[in-house]
Image (cartoon, helix red, strand yellow):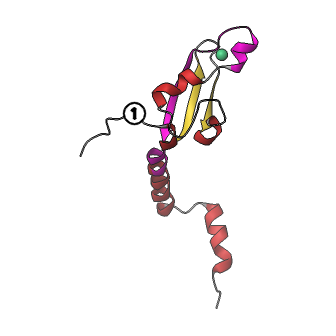
Amino acid sequence: MGLPTREPLLGEVASVSVECSDCGRSRWWQASQLMRFPGVFTGTPLAKLSARLTCSACQEDGLPGKSISVQALFVSESARVRAEAHVLNSREVPPEVSRAIAPLRRSG
Ligand SMILES: [Zn+2]
């Protein structure tokens, strides 16, 4: 058992932060949204993803817009975050949840 040694693929991540170091713009994309770009598929290695993306804002200014860096949020990581949130919720039921449960209770 050990950490996977091969490159992670776009299809294995939940979302990707794409940041342009030229203009400083950044935004989070769902992996499925990124696949609309040419040359970006489920099987695109994350290491090659940044080279296939272009900053549209920089291009409009006549710059190459190729100083892109990416940071991925993995599916397993978001699942872990959801699991921790569930643990928190089970300790203390938030008001909106108790309201949702209330109609199911029988008074008699
Ligand atoms: Zn830019």
Ligand 1 quarter of the rendering: top right
Q: Residue at x 64, y 14 (%)?
A: 65
For label 1, the residue is 7
Q: Position of residue 64 (x, y in %)?
A: 65, 10
Q: Residue at x 61, y 11 (%)?
A: 22
Using the image as rendered, state which of residue 12 and residue 41 is in the foreground. Answer: 41
Circle 1: residue type: Glu
Looking at the rendering, the stretch of residues picked out in magenta corresponds to 56-79
Q: Position of residue 98 (x, y in %)?
A: 62, 68
Q: Residue at x 50, y 38 (%)?
A: 43
Q: Indicate the quadrant where residue 51 lies.
A: top right
Q: Is mark 1 within 8 Å of ligand 1?
A: no
* Helix, strand or loop at mark 1: loop
Q: Residue at x 46, y 26 (%)?
A: 47
Q: Assess whether residue 75 is covered by the magenta stretch.
A: yes
**Residue farthest to the top, as pictured:** 62
Q: Position of residue 37 (x, y in %)?
A: 65, 31
Q: Position of residue 82 (x, y in %)?
A: 50, 52
Query: Is the residue marked by circle 1 packed among few (<14), some (14-19), or many (20+) residues within 10 Å?
Result: few
Left or right: 37 in relation to 68 = right
